[in-house]
Image (cartoon, helix red, strand yellow):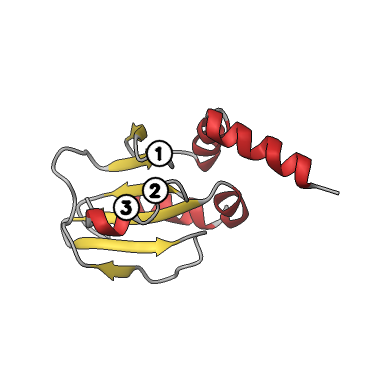
Amino acid sequence: MANAQDLGKHLWKERILLLISNGLEDAALRAQWRALQKEQKELRKRDLVVYVLTDEGSFFLGVDGESEEPEPLDGVGRPERYKDGVVLIGKDGTKKMERPFPVRPKDIFNLIDAMPMRRAEMNKNKQDEP
């Protein structure tokens, strides 16, 4: 994966969405990223950070989908054990989902919203509202 140190900084703070592909020019990868860019508010609400892992290297795409150009990371490229597609890592550092491209953002959000930690976050946010 991306350097474990890079991903470890998100533990207990953010969920990680990995977009895994052979290269940055892959049409399925680009379509997935475009779909996510349209959902910036939803990404932010769920504390999602997005990384792209390719044979060309690892790239950070932003905390809420705002990055137009991927930021290169030091570390390993695409992990061999994962096929091209989307991997969701929870705040606890465990894999929650692995699916081939394309994955509808709504499906990702529904999965996250069903998680106990996210449900607790949503309940806390309701209590914090005036």
Q: Amino acid at mark 2?
A: Leu
* Residue located 70% across and 35% down the image: 123
- Examine the rendered structure and indicate whether residue 130 appears above or below residue 60: above
The residue lying furthest to the right in this view is 130
Mark 3 Cα within 10 Å, few/some/many (few <14, many 20+)? few
Q: Which one is earlier in the sequence, the residue at label 2 or at label 1?
A: 2
Q: Amino acid at mark 3?
A: Gly
Q: Position of residue 108 (x, y in %)?
A: 49, 37
Find residue 71 and report its image quarter: bottom left
Which disc number belongs to residue 11?
A: 2
Q: Secondary structure at mark 1?
A: loop
Dot 2, crowdedness within 10 Å: few (<14), some or many (≥20)?
some
1 and 3 marks in contact (CB < 8 Å): no
Residue closest to the eye, 94 or 24 = 94
User: What residue is disc 1 on?
Assistant: 92
Residue visible at 51% across and 31% down in the picture: 111
Amino acid identity at mark 1: Asp
Query: What element does badge 2 sit on?
Result: loop
The residues bearing labels 1 and 3 have C-alpha atoms spaced at a distance of 10 Å
Residue holding disc 3:
8
